């Protein structure tokens, strides 16, 4: 009797579990259907609306601009070669200075006193040498005394030359013509070798530097002249002569190209100004040029969509050059093909398409 009751309980439990399982499965199916009803299901057979253009080969002169920065021709921070107290700063920020013009005067009074002392010493040694020379000829003194006097005179003259050079260096002068662009010390301060006192900038001519992608480098050569403008003076055309082409790429895989630019007589161009270089390239043969926005895929493997039999077909291309918002294609496209240039949102290889007029 007990075994029968136990069996009945097991059967009832299994039935309940089975019913619950069926209910759960039905509920899950219902939830799935409700979710699918809420989610938009894109119909891949629906034509995708795109914009397209016909590919053609053409020979054109393309022009574009590259932004760059003006830098001073020469710029340096001036410091003293000898230490001393500054007694006069003869220029201020904005002062135009010429080469070798005196800018700062250090106290040299002690050096001048030392020079007077050495001059007196030299005068005495010259008298000794003259006297010992006469006595040595008469064999009244030993020759070694004359030699000592002559050596002492030579040492004193070297000491004098050293003091004269130190006195000269207490007058700090401009190494080249330019403008004082920073004043880093004042009268009463102590100057020491290596401590900057003034900054001189030469902008009579400037350096204009741009960064050029690798594929554009063939358009630039040493001493070649280009037209450029400063952003502050867009109507003023300047000539820039290439003075340097970088031999090492920077982090952006582009190369610095530097131009030498003559400033205006009134020095309108300033260091740090931005400008634009005008580049005009003549194509020697007919090439296929397409909008850069039409390119999909990766940098290593660019691709484009073309229209064939009312469908979008994805195909590989080779890009030989990029400029402005266009790219030159060397392989993968032929003249007469229809290239999709816009409408890539739902586009895929083999998609039905409709071309906008």
Image (cartoon, rainbow, N blue to C red):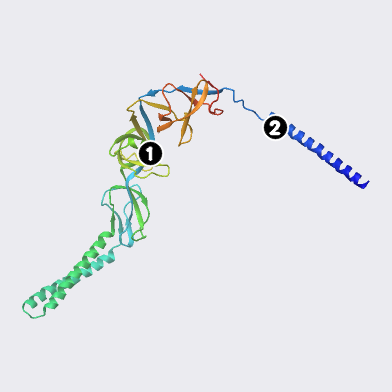
Q: Residue at x 89, y 45 (%)?
A: 6
Residue 208 is situated, as x and y percent measured from the top left of the image, at 34, 40
Number of on-image labels: 2
Q: Position of residue 239 (x, y in %)?
A: 30, 35
Decide: few, some or many residues near mark 2? Use Cα within 10 Å; few <14, some 14-19, many ≥20: few
Q: Nearer the viewer, residue 150 or 7?
A: 7
Q: Residue furthest left?
A: 138
1 vs 58, left or right, is right
Residue at horizontal 84 percent and vertical 38 percent from the top: 15
Q: Is residue 323 visible?
A: no
Q: Give the residue pinned by disc 2.
A: 35
Quadrant hosting residue 13: top right
Residue found at x 77% / y 33%: 26
Given the current orientation, which residue lies at the most extreme right position? 1
Give the class, few, some or many, for how many residues have Cα within 10 Å of label 1's Cα (few <14, many ≥20): few
Q: Nearer the viewer, residue 336 or 277?
A: 336
Task: Please name whichever residue, 144 or 121, is drawn nearer the observer in this view of the structure.
Answer: 144
Relative to residue 315, is residue 141 depicted above or below?
A: below
- Circle 2: element type: helix
Q: Residue 60: horizontal and vertical position, in percent?
A: 35, 25
Q: In terms of secondary structure, where does tag 1 sit?
A: helix
Q: CA distance from mark 1 to mark 2?
A: 52 Å
The answer to whether 355 is drawn above or below residue 85 in the figure is above
Q: Residue 10, percent across and down? A: 86, 43
Mark 1 or mark 2, which has the lower sequence index?
A: 2
**Is residue 84 something one can see in this rendering?**
yes
36 vs 84, nearest the viewer: 36
Query: In the displayed image of the protein, which residue is found farthest to the top?
Result: 357
* Point 8% across, 75% down: residue: 134
- Marks 1 and 2 in Cβ contact (< 8 Å): no
Q: Which residue is mark 1?
A: 214
Instruction: Say whether residue 256 is left or right of residue 44.
Output: left
């Amino acid at each position: 009797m007990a075994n029968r009751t136990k069996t009945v309980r097991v059967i009832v439990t299994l039935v309940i579990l089975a019913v619950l399982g069926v209910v759960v499965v039905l509920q899950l199916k219902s939830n799935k259907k409700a979710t699918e009803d809420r989610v938009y299901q894109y119909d891949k057979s629906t034509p995708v609306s795109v914009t397209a253009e016909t590919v053609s080969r053409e020979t054109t002169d393309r022009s574009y601009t590259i932004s760059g920065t003006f830098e001073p021709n020469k710029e340096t921070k001036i410091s003293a070669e000898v230490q001393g107290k500054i007694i006069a700063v003869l220029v201020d920020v904005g002062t135009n200075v010429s080469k070798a013009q005196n800018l700062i005067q250090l106290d040299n009074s002690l050096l001048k006193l030392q020079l007077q002392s050495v001059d007196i010493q030299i005068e005495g040694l010259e008298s000794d040498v003259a006297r010992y020379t006469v006595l040595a000829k008469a064999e009244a003194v030993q020759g070694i005394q004359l030699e000592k006097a002559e050596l002492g005179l030579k040492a004193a003259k070297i000491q004098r030359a050293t003091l004269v050079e130190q006195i000269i260096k207490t007058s700090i002068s401009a190494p080249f013509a330019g403008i004082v662009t920073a004043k880093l010390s004042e009268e009463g301060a102590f100057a020491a070798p290596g401590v900057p006192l003034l900054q001189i900038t030469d902008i009579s001519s400037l350096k204009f530097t741009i960064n050029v992608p690798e594929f554009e480098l063939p358009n630039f050569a040493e001493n070649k002249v280009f037209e450029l403008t400063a952003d502050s003076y867009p109507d003023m055309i300047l000539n820039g002569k290439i003075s340097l082409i970088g031999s090492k790429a920077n982090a952006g895989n582009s190369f610095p190209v530097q131009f030498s630019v003559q400033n205006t007589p009134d020095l309108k161009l300033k260091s740090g100004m931005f400008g634009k270089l005008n580049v005009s390239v003549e194509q020697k043969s007919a090439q296929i040029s397409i909008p850069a926005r039409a390119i999909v895929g990766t940098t290593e493997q660019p691709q484009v969509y073309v229209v064939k039999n009312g469908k979008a077909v994805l195909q590989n291309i080779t890009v030989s050059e990029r400029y402005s918002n266009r790219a030159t294609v060397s392989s993968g496209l032929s003249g007469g093909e229809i290239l999709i240039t816009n409408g890539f949102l739902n586009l895929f290889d083999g998609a039905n398409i409709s071309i906008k007029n």
